[in-house]
Image (tube, rainbow, N blue to C red):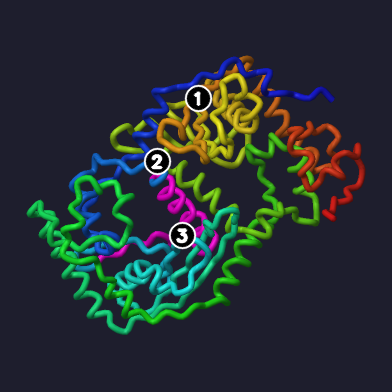
Amino acid sequence: MNQFRITDYVENVVANRTDHDRLLQKIGEVSERRNISVTDLVSPRQAYYARKNPEIPHTMEAKERMMAGSGFHDIFGKLMSNKEYLEQYVEREAIAGRIDIYEDIPIELKTTTLLGTIENIQIEKPEYFEQLGMYCAIIEKNKGIVIVKITDSTPGSSQYFLKAYDVTFDNLDDILNDMKIRRNQLQDALDGDDPSSLPKCKWNCDTCQYNMICDYNDAPTEIEFTIAKLAGVTENPTLASEVLEKLRTYEKRKQSSSIRQNDLITPRKTYFKAISEIEPSSDNQNTEPLEWMTRWGKVRGIEQAIFRRTSKKPGESANIPFPEDYELTGYIHTWNGEPAIFNLSKLTNIVELKDMKRLFSWQIESLAIQCALLGRTRGKLFVSYDKLQGDLAKMRAYDIYFKDIEKIKLEYVSRINQLKRAIENNELSELPYCPTWMCTRCEYNGTCLKPSGALKPFKKG
């Protein structure tokens, strides 16, 4: 069997500084603020400067932390609840907010990085309960739940923890009155261009992007989390275990009968997954769901920031389905009408252009499929080097040019049909091999090396 190699069809790789600069600009764009929000009332001084100085950007590291949190929320929420209960907008007394999950009672998901784990959540993270208490007052519910994903930042540690807490508030009227006082204080400061009456934030002022213009040392007081002090907090380890188990079993779902783009890159693995009675799962995903959710949450958050549609440049980015003729499930991100893929790289150095085909082969093959099926000869690869610091170093944008696009299209359309026949006939002999670098860690490597015949699923150990 002659193995098709997509690298033979890559004509050129070019670093695109224009796209790079626009990516940084788009990631840093702040949506227009209207109503005073619950988040504003947790840190009113920072909210004041954010509204008055939208041109002051976050650092790239801070942006990525926020985007990672947003992406994690998105993945977690979709695993734990139905879409109609996620990110519920609520409002009362001109104070607005979005509850992470709100079906019967509000559920807030929080992510944090700590040295070790939490000993007393109410003392160490009072802002979590401050925010939940305000949501409870807005919707007039006296019970809620806080779920916290903790990353242990101890040097040499890569542990993750999940904690769940049942929370009660018996003083909703008092909480609402406190909220109105804070709202009025912040609104007066905004109207009068004078933040001097606003309390100092709890956070480390030295790392705040507004520290050069904020007279935080002259603040009358430090913010007191009075609402958090009203909370009755009880840890619920049973709920935490149930949530973790739900996350673990998510990756064991039965393989869908529809074909996705990645299936064309790993056709044999797709075949084995489709016909095997044993559901494969990587050790990483099966034993530590919080680890893969953390990484993919970061990817999802950055993708959402890059590919979201904006009124300023409405045609810049979009998500379009694969053409119906090819029966592929999923969507293609586009950037100015051309297929675009984002990659969060673990590499510690920026890759030279001559090495791009080798070190980003998976991403380039994915891009080739999209370009071929849309009839494009150029695609966009956006890379964030996760371990590097600084805006210019961390993010890179590349143009990938392909030749013989019709031959590429013919190859992958053929793979779609080959996969269908292989699964229907329980025969893999005509399927191309997956990329060589994947084989040693594939769950099915023991079986795949056999020429054909009845499947004997490969068992680890």
Quadrant containing the N terminus is top right
**Amino acid at the residue labelled 2:** Met
Residue placed under numbered mark 3 in the picture: 111
Determine whether label 3 and label 1 are within 8 Å by CB.
Answer: no
Relative to residue 227, is residue 450 depicted above or below?
above
Q: Which badge, 2 or 3, is on the more N-terminal residue?
A: 2
Specify the principal SS of the magenta part. helix
Mark 1 residue element = strand
The x and y percentages for residue 42 are 28, 64
Taking depth in this image into account, of 35 and 461 the one nearest to the observer is: 461
Magenta stretch encompasses residue 418: no
Q: Which badge, 3 or 1, is on the more N-terminal residue?
A: 3
Relative to residue 366, is residue 354 depicted above or below?
above
Count of numbered circles on the image: 3
Residue placed under numbered mark 2 in the picture: 60
The x and y percentages for residue 449 are 87, 38
Residue placed under numbered mark 1 in the picture: 398
Stretch in magenta: 63-91
Question: Would you identify the image quadrant in which residue 190 lies?
Answer: bottom left
Q: CA distance from mark 2 to mark 1?
A: 19 Å
| Callout 1 crowding tier (Cα within 10 Å): few <14, some 14–19, many ≥20 | many
Q: CA distance from mark 3 to mark 1?
A: 32 Å
